[in-house]
Amino acid sequence: MSQYPDAAFLTSANAVSQFVEDSGVEVAVAGRSNAGKSSAINVIVNRRQFARTSKTPGRTQLINFFHLREGQRLVDLPGYGFAKVSDKMRRHWGELIQDYFKRRRSLKGLIVVVDIRRRLTDFDRQMVDFAESVDLPVHVLLTKSDKLKRGQAATALLEVRKALGERASVQLFSATKRDGEDEARRHLEAMLAAGSG
């Protein structure tokens, strides 16, 4: 059973004026297209098809707000880095995400979803920079860890931890095998709890 029985989709926003009321606590989830962001959200919330998964990367083209429990939300940011959108649309997303980080007082943490086979991209680093600029804790999920041998996954984990240092906590994660599910949920809960305190 889901740890969030009341979890529900709230709204999608394509402009700051469409954001939900800036109250309570929310944690954002960001990731490059095709990094497995929607699958990771579904596993952490433990609800199938909660965040829609798609064979087409970059399906999340708006900022999606989800209710988790009273006064707590999860926010799914656009799958950045998707190649098949216009430069104008990509710029719009960039500005919208930047505005989101700057304006949201209820934003208390960021989870960055990274395909373990790609390691950190410029987009991932940019998201960490955004979070750092407003003093947010960051947790990185190295997804699709089941696609690598155990030794390779451990090496990738060390590399990313070294690259980010104190800026973020990092873990291995596999939505398919549900590896790292509890650890990821603990980090989400810690961010929500810190924001509520």
Image (spheres, helix red, strand yellow):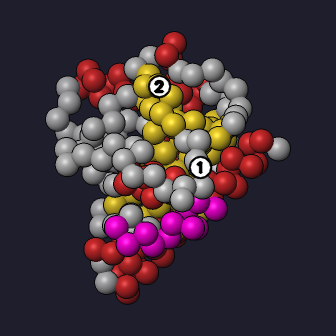
The answer to whether any part of residue 64 appears in the image is yes
Q: Amino acid at mark 2?
A: Thr
The disc at residue 126 is none
- Which circle's residue, 2 or 1, is located before the other in the chain? 1
Q: Residue furthest right?
A: 197
**Circle 2 sits on which residue?**
11
Picture residue at 30% right of the left edge, 78% below the top? 148
**Percent position of residue 127, x then y:** 47, 43
| Residue 13 picture quarter | top left
Q: Amino acid at mark 1?
A: Tyr
Question: Marks 2 and 1: which is nearer the front?
Answer: 1
Mark 1 element type: loop
**Circle 1 sits on which residue?**
4
Q: Is residue 164 above or below residue 97?
A: below
Decide: few, some or many residues near mark 2? Use Cα within 10 Å; few <14, some 14-19, many ≥20: some
Mark 2 element type: strand
